[in-house]
């Protein structure tokens, strides 16, 4: 059995809304092996996005631990957490979050430039990834000139440009039509195999979930096997 890349133990997370505390995650446990792709399903509002944010270090749990590749996200100082997240975790969100004033190529380059990789070194890496996701003819196009599916392919390339240890995708096809969503499913699975990724996908789409190694459902703040 492959080693565990991500381990979450006893994760609690709650928010105060309109004066009331809402418990989103309750003592949640999760182990994900290196190279595994795991789908997380559940009703809207159940906390799938919150879970991914905690697992990826975008948000801190109220209790419990999250370890990715031996690094304890929950205990890390802010600067160390940001540095680890930027280097080792890739995110794909439902609504792309591309920078509208920059081209597709510049958007994909951005994580490398933030890491102080010179433009001369960053550009060919970003260009090759965009070509790999089928956007060789769209390098200079800004997001507003791209279709929804093309924007999401740019987002996938951006998430992979630093070769992260862990890819987290939050409803990556939720804003796309069925055929475009199916095409993106295929791309994500191809990237998983090609890059040897460890990936967690939050999705409502059973067709995508069924092609993953495991399917878990988030219910009442905990993960259960479907």
Image (tube, rainbow, N blue to C red):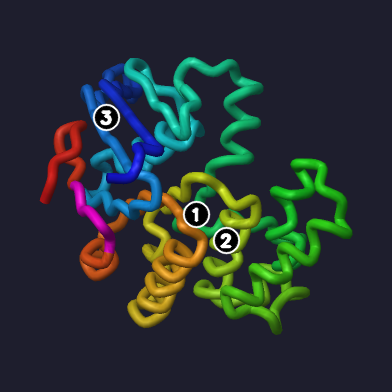
Element under disc 2: helix
Q: Residue 5: image x %, image y %?
A: 40, 38
Screen quadrant of the N terminus? top left
Q: Are marks 2 and 1 in contact (CB under 8 Å)?
A: yes
Farthest residue, direction left: 226
Q: Earlier in the sequence, mark 2 or mark 3?
A: 3
The residue lying toward the viewer, choosing from 151 and 159, is: 159
Q: Range of the magenta residues?
A: 212-216
How many numbered badges does the structure rendering display?
A: 3
**Residue 97, located in which quarter of the rendered image?**
bottom right
Q: Is residue 19 magenta?
A: no
Q: Residue at x 50, y 74 (%)?
A: 149
Nearer to us of marks 3 and 1 is 1
Q: Left of 202 or right of it: where is 216?
A: left
Give the number of the disc on residue 42.
none
Q: Residue 39: image x %, image y %?
A: 28, 53
The residue lying toward the viewer, choosing from 74 and 88, is: 88
The residue lying toward the viewer, choosing from 83 and 23, is: 83
Element under disc 1: strand
Q: Left of 3 or right of it: where is 225?
A: left
Q: Is residue 214 magenta?
A: yes
Q: Which residue is mark 3?
A: 24
Q: Which residue is mark 2?
A: 155
Q: Earlier in the sequence, mark 3 or mark 1?
A: 3
Q: Which residue is mark 1?
A: 92
């Amino acid at each position: 059995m492959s080693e565990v890349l991500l381990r979450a133990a006893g994760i609690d997370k709650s928010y105060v809304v309109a004066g009331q505390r809402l418990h989103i995650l309750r003592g949640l446990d999760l182990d994900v092996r290196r190279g595994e792709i795991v789908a997380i399903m559940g009703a809207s509002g159940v906390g799938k996005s919150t879970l991914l944010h905690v697992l990826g270090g975008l948000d801190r749990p109220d209790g419990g631990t999250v370890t990715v590749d031996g690094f304890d996200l929950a205990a890390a100082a802010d600067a160390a957490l940001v540095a680890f997240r930027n280097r080792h975790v890739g995110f794909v969100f439902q609504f792309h979050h591309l920078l509208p004033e920059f081209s597709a190529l510049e958007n994909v380059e951005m994580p490398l430039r933030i890491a102080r990789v010179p433009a001369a070194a960053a550009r060919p890496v970003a260009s090759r990834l965009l070509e790999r996701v089928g956007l060789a003819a769209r390098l200079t196009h800004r997001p507003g000139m791209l279709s929804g599916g093309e924007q999401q392919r740019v987002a996938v390339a951006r998430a992979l440009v630093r070769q992260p240890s862990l890819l987290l995708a939050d409803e990556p096809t939720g804003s796309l039509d069925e055929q475009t969503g199916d095409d993106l499913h295929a791309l994500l699975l191809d990237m998983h195999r090609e890059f040897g990724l460890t990936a967690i996908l939050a999705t409502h789409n059973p067709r995508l979930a069924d092609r993953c190694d495991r399917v878990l459902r988030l219910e009442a703040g905990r993960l259960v096997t479907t």
